[in-house]
Image (cartoon, rainbow, N blue to C red):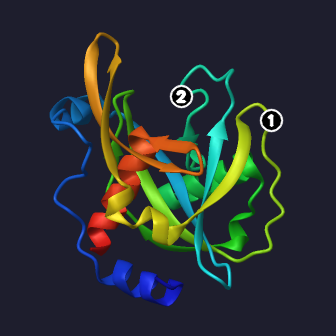
Amino acid sequence: MDLDEFRRRLAGARAPAASVYGDDGAEERHAAGVTPAAVLVPVVDHPEAPTVLFTRRTAQLKKHSGQISFPGGRAEPSDPSIEFTALRETLEEIGLPPEKVEVIAALPEYFTRTGFRVTPVVGVVQPPLELVPDAREVDEIFEVPLAFLLDAGNHRRASRDIGGRTAHYYEIEHNGRIIWGATAGMIVNLYRMLA
């Protein structure tokens, strides 16, 4: 899918009634999701094919250490909008200036088990990129083809024991990296909106 088609389909997409989580715990997620946050889903407009940019969080972080995620974080009371939050956090984490991002959509909120109400903000980024990861938060920055992420054949259901209970979630594996949990759930929600 090229970016013109991606933009058209996203503009015409109806948001689902509820996000897909991979389990049946939506009610408890909504009750716990009290902290607003935002992530940027950075779609890089490469001439050959668009990709999506991800980060791997550092091992020393207290929450979600070592996990693959979109750049983003908690909303601050002074943030004028949730899109601003996504862009501010992205600048802080990977050095991507807001003026390099064309915001095209905000997706439905995704409620995490850890108490966050996350708004994924989709933005198109024009290369070349000169990214500077914050070494305290980001171990690695990498890209995955958009077409690969939007192929339902790459979306797997998985489970693991978390805090004494079995959690079900989605995961997407690409070149040995496993995108799982909230990040994979947001990708599956994007796919379902576009399908």
In the rendered image, which residue does mark 1 sit on? 135
Give the secondary structure at mark 2.
Answer: loop
Task: Tell which of 166 and 42 is nearer to you.
Answer: 166
Question: The disc labelled 2 sits on which kind of residue?
Answer: His
**Disc 1 and disc 2: Cα gap in Å?**
15 Å
Indicate the position of residue 11 as horizontal and vertical percent values: 36, 82
Q: Quadrant of residue 101?
A: bottom right
Indicate the position of residue 38 as horizontal and vertical percent values: 49, 49
Indicate the position of residue 167 as horizontal and vertical percent values: 28, 26
Q: Is residue 8 above or below residue 118?
A: below
Q: Is residue 180 visible?
A: yes
Q: Residue at x 67, y 79 (%)?
A: 46
Task: Tell which of 168 and 90 is nearer to you.
Answer: 168
Task: Tell which of 187 and 14 is nearer to you.
Answer: 187
Q: Residue at x 21, y 37 (%)?
A: 23
In the rendered image, which residue does mark 2 sit on? 64
Question: The disc labelled 1 sits on which kind of residue?
Answer: Ala
Q: Is residue 72 above or below residue 57?
A: below
Indicate the position of residue 108 as horizontal and vertical percent values: 32, 58
